[in-house]
């Protein structure tokens, strides 16, 4: 392959997602009325926040050469658990919801790390089962008026919605884990070469288990935020297809599905890009089907760039 | 066994009535950077069992894949039954009558034994539907012939590996194969199953089927093979009848060393003997693992380099892996400085100071996506961290020290390790382990596949490390390296210690032990 082409593709993989976000912003600034209004930005960010949070966990899992399909169902479970425990107050309810998510993650992780089930199969089983569990715990939509929870969903601090602040804080935390901690380094090593990691004495199973627990807990947090914004627990439809949005964000953000690399900011930008694309097409009165096809093009472009890298 | 060919002949098979059934003429196969087959000629006659031998990388599997349509030739030709053959795929070769039985059984483990056996040739009843009763009956009858009595309705995967292999063999023969290629068929078989296999081979031979038999077990070759072709570095270095071929001579052909060759001066960078006094730091006693190791014992003193010799499959790598905790043991114990190391745990072995440089650098050593820096720090990370947070300054210090000491050539510490040359990758792995301050260094083929310059550097380094008091176990297929690098050589054969050479270590001596001669 010619060097310049290779250089261009490497650049595209590294910065393509930032460039695409920039281009979309410029386009909208020029051609979309009221796009630059603060309200619009706020809406976009509030909508993308749960996806970002789920995608952060997904990026870690994918970094270990795995995948977590159960995240959407974990969001639903978290909605159900909140409804069950809201009588004890908002804080215990949220705590229980996150704990439930972590437990689902532990089940995923145990299947993958100790039983040796393929990640896609293990988490597919929990995708189905946990959705069912969520519906058993809470058979139908249930509204609530808990002021704390409602505030989490709709209040702002210094003009920034709490939901968005939560996403920013979690992004910073995950970025710190990946870049600065022993665990973060070991995680990408396991994804890059599991046999080598094992022979280097890394606690491979414990690392895998932990990664899935984190992914489950983050999905549960996303479930809490989405539920508090809805002001209702909706175990039937909350988080449907969330696993696909999260995987898309991770892939578009430049994290290869083959593991060994995690791009935290890229993942956030991947989620933002898909959100902006949807918003742009909606504002120009193009039907939903156009959005889906445009998203497909972006996913293919991202996967192509990742393929060229090896 | 009757000698089928005039002794001392080359690859030629002229003068036979039928001519060879399968033949490769001047076969050339080139992969990026490697010439796997460099003009190999090979011929297989009807009704003969032809041994194909050679060390790792000699070109055996490439030749098999060329013969069976997995690879296309870059030069030369394959002839089958007197005509030029161009098999586009393994399936085409199979249809033409060339059956291959690989080390790993390539059948469908979830399907029943009967279906596997008769796949594609199921007896049909009315409406073209499979007649299951007839299928079961036929399968049971066929397997009885091979001395296998199993419920043919059971999924194949639920049976032992030996039985699976026999089913694969039976299937191949049922398909009226004219040529059967067996790649290490006995590696997972019990002795009783091996006997059954040999009986089957004798039966096939009587029917005129030609067999290519790949194995490292010399006893087996001498028992059942008529002729042998020895491959080395992509060339056929010898073809001829096996009866009358001296065992030592066969081994010397495989390893590329003249039997009587005695070198006045070595070519490796090892300085020679070390003062190895005192108690052994590493003691391994009675290491046993089903089908792999049969009671290997080993002791290494500080500052001593102990070579592990033996042919491929003799248990060298397995011994190293067992000591490093990477291979679970059925029996045996490992101790370091008199303290027992819990078996089957890599972290426990590392904690005790035992580290392994694995044979397969790419698959088991380097993490290609990580930088040189992160690869070096990988094992030592917990020591270079505080409260789970990596101390970048500590990592930089360690990495800089080893990049300097081992002269690792990289664009910088942040270059992905996957982009480095083989020699530099090997140095990165050595650095990874030296950063752990080990007591025992297990080196499995440390210089294989790296260029001459790096090889000399790695050898000099091993020497230096032993000089610093490390106990080193050196595994190498390169006899010269073994002879010149080791203070002592322990030779393994079929998973057990076959002999040991102390003071007078020569290539001849090692080969003699491998062949089963003296030095016991």
Image (cartoon, coloured by chain):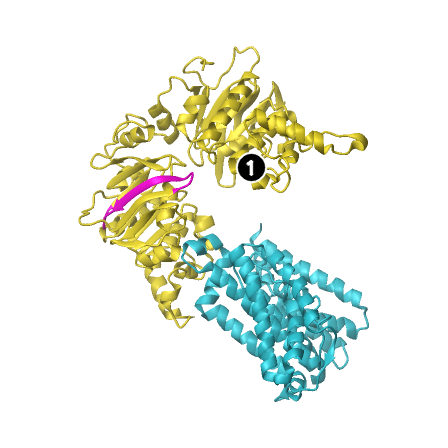
Chain colours: A cyan, B yellow
Question: Magenta stretch containing residue B294, yes or no?
Answer: yes
Q: Tell me where the magenta segment starts and ends, as one range.
A: B289-304
Quarter location, residue A89: bottom right
Q: Residue at x 20, y 50 (%)?
A: B279
Q: Residue at x 40, y 73 (%)?
A: B387
Q: In this view, does B495 lie above or below A247?
A: above
Pick the residue in front: B184 or A168. Answer: B184
Question: Magenta stretch containing residue B338, yes or no?
Answer: no
Q: Is residue B91 left or right of residue B225?
A: right
Residue A246 visible (yes or no): yes
Place of residue A302 in the rendered image (x, y in percent of width and height, measured from the top left): 64, 60
Residue B89 visible (yes or no): no
Place of residue B241 in the rendered image (x, y in percent of width and height, measured from the top left): 43, 18
Q: Which chain letter matches label 1?
A: B
Quarter location, residue B436: bottom left
Q: Is residue B416 left or right of residue B133?
A: left
Residue for badge 1: B105
Place of residue B467 in the rendered image (x, y in percent of width and height, measured from the top left): 22, 50
Q: In this view, does B459 lie above or below B173?
A: below
Pick the residue in front: A8 or B249. Answer: B249
């Amino acid at each position: 392959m010619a060097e310049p082409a290779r250089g261009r593709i490497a650049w595209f993989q590294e910065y393509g997602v930032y460039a695409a976000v920039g281009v979309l912003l410029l386009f909208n600034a020029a051609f979309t009325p009221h796009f630059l209004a603060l309200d619009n930005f706020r809406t976009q960010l509030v909508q993308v926040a749960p996806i970002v949070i789920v995608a952060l966990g997904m990026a870690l899992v994918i970094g270990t050469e795995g995948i977590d399909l159960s995240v959407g169902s974990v969001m639903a479970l978290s909605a159900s658990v909140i409804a069950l425990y809201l009588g004890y107050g908002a804080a215990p309810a949220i705590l229980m919801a996150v704990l439930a998510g972590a437990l689902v993650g532990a089940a995923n992780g145990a299947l993958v790390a100790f039983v040796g089930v393929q990640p896609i199969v293990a988490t597919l089983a929990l995708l189905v089962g946990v959705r069912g569990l969520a519906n058993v715990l809470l058979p139908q939509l249930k509204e609530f008026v808990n002021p704390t929870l409602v505030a989490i969903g709709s209040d702002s601090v210094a003009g920034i919605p709490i939901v968005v602040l939560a996403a920013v804080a979690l992004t910073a935390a995950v970025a710190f884990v990946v870049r600065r901690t022993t665990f973060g380094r070991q995680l990408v090593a396991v994804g890059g070469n599991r046999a080598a990691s094992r022979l280097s004495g890394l606690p491979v199973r414990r690392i895998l288990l932990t990664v899935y627990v984190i992914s489950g807990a983050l999905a549960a947090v996303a479930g809490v935020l989405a539920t508090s914004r809805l002001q209702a627990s909706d175990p039937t439809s909350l988080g449907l297809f969330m696993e696909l949005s999260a995987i898309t964000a991770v892939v578009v953000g430049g994290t290869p599905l083959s593991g060994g690399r995690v791009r935290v900011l890229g993942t956030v930008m991947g989620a933002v890009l898909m959100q902006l694309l949807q918003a742009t097409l909606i504002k120009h009165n193009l039907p939903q089907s156009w959005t889906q096809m445009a998203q497909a093009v972006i996913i293919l472009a991202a996967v192509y760039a990742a393929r060229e890298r090896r | 066994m009757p000698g089928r060919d005039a002794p001392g002949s080359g690859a030629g098979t002229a003068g036979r009535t039928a001519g060879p059934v399968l033949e490769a003429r001047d076969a050339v196969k080139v992969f990026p950077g490697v010439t796997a087959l460099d003009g190999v000629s090979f011929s297989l006659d009807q009704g003969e069992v032809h041994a194909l031998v050679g060390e790792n990388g000699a070109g055996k599997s490439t030749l098999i894949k060329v013969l069976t349509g997995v690879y296309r030739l870059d030069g030369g030709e394959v002839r089958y039954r007197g005509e030029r053959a161009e098999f586009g795929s393994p399936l085409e070769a199979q249809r033409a009558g060339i059956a291959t039985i690989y080390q790993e059984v390539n059948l469908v483990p979830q399907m029943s034994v009967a279906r596997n056996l008769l796949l594609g040739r199921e007896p049909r009843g009315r409406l073209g539907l499979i007649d299951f009763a007839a299928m079961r009956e036929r399968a049971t009858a066929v397997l009885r012939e091979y001395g296998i009595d199993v419920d043919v309705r059971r999924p194949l995967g639920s049976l032992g590996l030996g039985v699976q292999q026999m089913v694969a063999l039976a299937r191949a023969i049922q398909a009226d194969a004219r040529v059967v290629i067996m790649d290490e068929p006995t590696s997972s078989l019990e002795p009783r199953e091996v006997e059954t296999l040999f009986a089957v081979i004798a039966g096939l031979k009587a029917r005129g089927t030609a067999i290519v038999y790949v194995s490292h077990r010399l006893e087996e070759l001498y028992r059942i093979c008529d002729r042998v072709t020895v491959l080395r570095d992509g060339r056929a270095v010898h073809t001829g009848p096996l009866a009358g071929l001296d065992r030592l001579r066969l081994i010397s052909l495989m390893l590329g060393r003249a039997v009587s060759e005695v070198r006045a001066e070595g070519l490796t960078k090892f300085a020679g003997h070390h003062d190895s006094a005192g108690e052994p730091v590493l003691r391994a006693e009675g290491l046993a693992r089903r089908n792999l190791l049969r009671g290997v014992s080993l002791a290494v003193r500080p500052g001593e380099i102990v070579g592990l010799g033996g042919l491929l499959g003799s248990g060298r790598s397995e011994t190293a892996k067992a000591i490093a905790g990477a291979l679970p043991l059925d029996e045996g114990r490992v101790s370091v400085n008199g303290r027992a190391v819990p078996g089957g745990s890599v972290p426990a072995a590392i904690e005790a100071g035992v580290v392994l440089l694995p044979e397969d650098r790419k698959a088991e050593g380097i993490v290609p996506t990580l930088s040189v820096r992160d690869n070096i720090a990988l094992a030592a990370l917990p020591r270079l961290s505080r409260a789970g947070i990596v101390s970048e300054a500590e990592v930089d210090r360690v990495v800089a020290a080893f990049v300097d000491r081992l002269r690792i050539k990289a664009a910088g510490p942040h270059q992905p390790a996957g982009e480095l040359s083989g020699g530099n990758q090997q140095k990165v792995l050595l650095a990874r382990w030296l950063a752990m301050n080990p007591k025992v260094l297990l080196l499995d083929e440390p210089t294989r596949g790296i260029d001459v310059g790096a090889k000399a550097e790695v050898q000099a380094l091993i020497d230096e490390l032993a000089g610093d008091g490390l106990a080193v176990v050196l595994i190498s297929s390169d006899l010269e390296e073994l002879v010149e690098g080791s203070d002592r050589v322990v030779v393994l054969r079929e998973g057990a210690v076959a002999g040991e050479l102390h003071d007078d270590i020569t290539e001849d001596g090692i080969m003699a032990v491998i062949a089963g001669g003296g030095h016991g």
